[in-house]
Amino acid sequence: MSIAADRLVNSRGWLTKVPAITATFWVIKVLSTTVGETVADYLNVSVGLGPAVTDGIMLALLAAALVGQFRTRAHTPWIYWLCVVLVSIVGTQITDLLTDTLGVPLAVSTAVFAVILAVVFTVWYRQERTLAIASINTPRREAFYWGAILTTFALGTAAGDFATEALNLGFRNGALVFGGLIVATWIALRLGAGQVLTFWIAYVLTRPLGASLGDLLTQDKDLGGLALGASVTSLLFLVAILLLVVREQLLMSRHGVVEKGAGPNGGRGRDYAWAGAATLAVVIAGLGLSLAQGSSSSTDPQAGAAQATIPLTASDGTSTNQVVHPTTKLGNLGKFAVIVSDVQAKVGQNDLAGARTRVKDLEVAWDDAEAGLKPRDASRWHQLDDQIDAVLTALRAPKPTQVDCAAAVGTLMHTLNTFDGG
């Protein structure tokens, strides 16, 4: 999608503060969207900062980046894209806060963010008489712009999650559906649809597209992903973003404009080439790393072990062993059962600190598998998700008790065993 972005100068000497809308722009946008998804999950779950600490850190970083952005008088690629990445993370966290912490249904949050975005656009147009991207050359217009950007990320997160949950698309079908909608938006632009309208539609759609691509790279291979993990995926995309932003920065003259012959009007072919090369590099690197991990795991005698022998205690106090290999639509849940078994054993020994440490592995593994498991059997996924939350709550209580923890873990293990062959 290409929108002419002439460099406009106002009476105070401000230049347009946003980049030209080129192929490279959209590639960086999708990559930054994926990074926003994976970084938030990595800090929140893998590092263990928790939602409150992660939210506070990201909000502080975003505020600092926006201060730097507003102080510039022309488009500065590295500051602009830093803001976009951080807005992506914060926008995701806002929706997650409403959904996971406050329990707001995705349909409601989607509608609310859509209304907020409509209000932002209405007030913006009434104040400035234009929504053109090329006209972001005053502080007030830029404030409207970043308000709209933040809302689109929150809306894209909510709408994307709502669509995939309601339709059970999964991350692979989600990538195809949202990618197809973006292509349809581009076709509408070519057929004469308004540039401003199609730009913002595409901007919203890139959020769920980026999330689907992120899940495709991070999900386990038995769920149809490439099993790169959040940290590797984030690093891979950040490197690609860095290379494209450095190139964009180098093309800027000392006056803050794109040098003649280097921008979309004089170098569209090179823009497409760089955008395509970055996309191809990410694909090749992702597939290469996935294949390398596959070769490594194939030589590991314990790799891919799906079944788990779970020690169970019957009502009469006798112990038995059961091979847990659930064959529900969720697939093989053996790797989760192994962790739950370890947690149950530690709780039985009243080692609640050890159980609390081990249950973190369950939390990370379950969250990582959500995009692949949930579309397969949403009702049973929610049942397990609620029970896992109950285990986490019991073990992380200010004063956990063995009785409460054992009850929560026992319920979860019973459900896993019930699902066997269900």
Image (cartoon, rainbow, N blue to C red):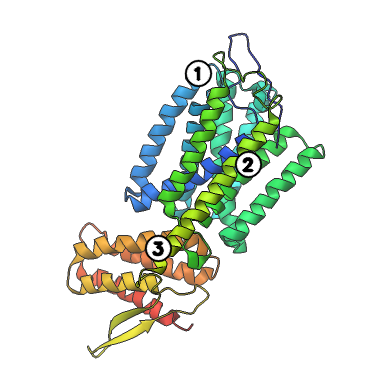
Q: Position of residue 416 (x, y in %)?
A: 40, 77
> Which circle, 1 or 3, is nearer the viewer?
3
Q: Which residue type does callout 1 highlight?
A: Thr
Give yes or no for contact between labels 1 and 3 (Cβ–Cβ under 8 Å): no
Q: Is residue 366 visible?
A: yes
Residue tagged by mark 1?
A: 72
Q: Is residue 143 visible?
A: no
State whether residue 274 is above or below residue 263.
below
Q: Where is residue 12 shown, x and y percent of the image?
A: 58, 9
Q: Amino acid at mark 3?
A: Ser
On residue 296, which mark appears? Answer: 3
Relative horizontal placement of residue 197, taking residue 303 as reference (left or right):
right
Residue closer to the observer: 154 or 365: 365
Answer with the quarter of the image where residue 368 lies: bottom left
Q: Secondary structure at mark 2?
A: helix
> Count the marks: how many?
3
Q: Nearer the viewer's eye, disc 2 or disc 1? A: 2
Q: What whole-number distance in Å separates the C-alpha atoms at marks 1 and 3?
A: 48 Å
Crowd band around label 1 with a 10 angstrom C-alpha radius: few (<14), some (14–19), many (20+): some
Residue picked out by circle 2 = 276
Q: Quadrant of residue 388?
A: bottom left
Q: Secondary structure at mark 1?
A: loop
Left or right of 217: which side holds 303? left
Q: Earlier in the sequence, mark 1 or mark 3?
A: 1
Measure how far apart labels 2 and 3 are at the Cα level: 30 Å
Picture disc at residue 394: none
Q: Amino acid at mark 2?
A: Gly
Q: Earlier in the sequence, mark 2 or mark 3?
A: 2
Residue at 44% x, 24% y is 67
Residue 173, percent across and down?
Answer: 62, 60
